[in-house]
Amino acid sequence: IILFSIPLLPPCYLLTHLLFNHNPCYVIISWLQQFISNHLTVNRDGSATDATTIESEMKLNAADNGNNELEDPSLGPQLLAFVIVATFGYRATNYLVPIIKSYTLRKGISGKDMGKRGTSLEDKDVPEALGIVPGAVFLICLIFCLVGYATSHPSKLLDCNSALLSVCFMLFLGFTDDVLDWPWRYKLVLPTVASLPLLCCYTGSTSIVVPIQLRPLLMQDGALTIFGKVLCYFIVVDENADGAIVNLGLWYLLYMGMLAVFCTNAINIYAGINGLEAGQSYIIGCAVLLHNLIEIKHGSYARENHLFSAMIMLSFIGVTMALLKHNWYPASVFVGDTFCYFAGMTFAVVGILGHFSKTLLLFFIPQVINFLLSVPQLFKIVPCPRHRLPRFNAETGMMEPSTFDCKPGEYQW
């Protein structure tokens, strides 16, 4: 319990500060009023009032009243509603995992835990693909959250639907991979397809700030360098900013598509030890939530985007915490590729739609390091033991690195 609470303490501190400064009933009343206005209000001429018109009227009314309560409903109650849904997600996942694992065992979706060789649990079948439980519960929680969020933020409805579509697609892909064992070439292509709905509705900036040390490579004395002129064939260098800003255009969209592929597969290859997949996802989720709450608390210009990300992360942390409880050593269930793909795409969703895709990579530093160390094995430069799993030494009770046979002096570079 202490280990579980450590990553969650900083976000909980900020949540407490944001929650208890407002009346918790306000957001529920606000959602109901806006839902009725959006879907049940009919004009005198018999035509229905669309969401865009209502949102514009709300902003005008808020400006006339000298406040922004209608334009931006009370933040604390919204977060409280998301916390309540996340708590439901935790309780539901914790309740359903022991039930669903009996079904997977009955259908033969199980395996042996290689990390328990030499122990009394060596031959015990462990149910696999239990990531389907938190994934399904997460989708239910997200639908409940999106009903309220999209009602109070009609302009974000497209983002909400694209998030649901992408996560649902990867959850389906992960479960079929656990059952059918897809080749790696499909695991690289299909996440790219799943990211297309996110890229289609992305409306953020495609520009980046160039580090100070690299700016002389682009411009010197107010003029583009030779290297800067060559780059202008592919990207746009802002000469008014003296090379400090570069607009990547379609290249930035390509980066975000590759980010979705990286997030899903980075968690998948950094796995194999009880609690590692769910544990790293839980820690990254807490870090992302902390980042969102800091931006919200300090009034970031992208406050609405960070609120959207916090809504998703709260439900994700809830279901992941419940799964981690059952996947902790000695694991009674395996999360499978179902959870890895679902978790990775969830992070890609909040990074892209929350407009902090570059910051997201900072939370994946251990996964980036693991990927770089894995490149020789992934590209068959050196032999790769299956899953590269460490071996359990029953005599010492410790995990030892995996090895492969080679000739003396071979692969010493």
Image: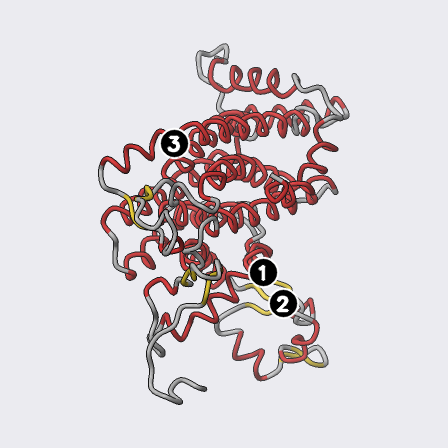
The disc labelled 2 sits on which kind of residue?
A: Asp
Disc on res. 93? none
Q: Nearer the viewer, residue 2 or 413?
A: 2
Residue identifier under label 1 = 207
- Residue found 49% across the figure and 27% down from its top: 91
Q: Are marks 2 and 3 in contact (CB under 8 Å)?
A: no
Q: As displayed, is residue 121 above or below residue 136?
A: below
Query: How far apart are the two marked residues, 3 and 1, measured between alpha carbons?
Result: 48 Å
State left or right for residue 247 relative to residue 372.
right
Residue identifier under label 2 = 238
- The answer to which quarter of the image holds residue 189 is bottom left
Residue identifier under label 3 = 98
Q: Secondary structure at mark 3?
A: helix
Q: Nearer the viewer, residue 327 or 181?
A: 327
- Residue found 59% across the figure and 47% down from its top: 288
The reply to whether residue 352 is in sight is no
Q: As displayed, is residue 4 above or below residue 255?
A: above
Q: Are marks 2 and 1 in contact (CB under 8 Å)?
A: yes
The disc labelled 3 sits on which kind of residue?
A: Pro
Image coords of residue 367 (percent x, y): 50, 61
Instruction: Say which quadrant the N terminus sits in.
Output: top right
The reply to whether residue 241 is in sight is yes
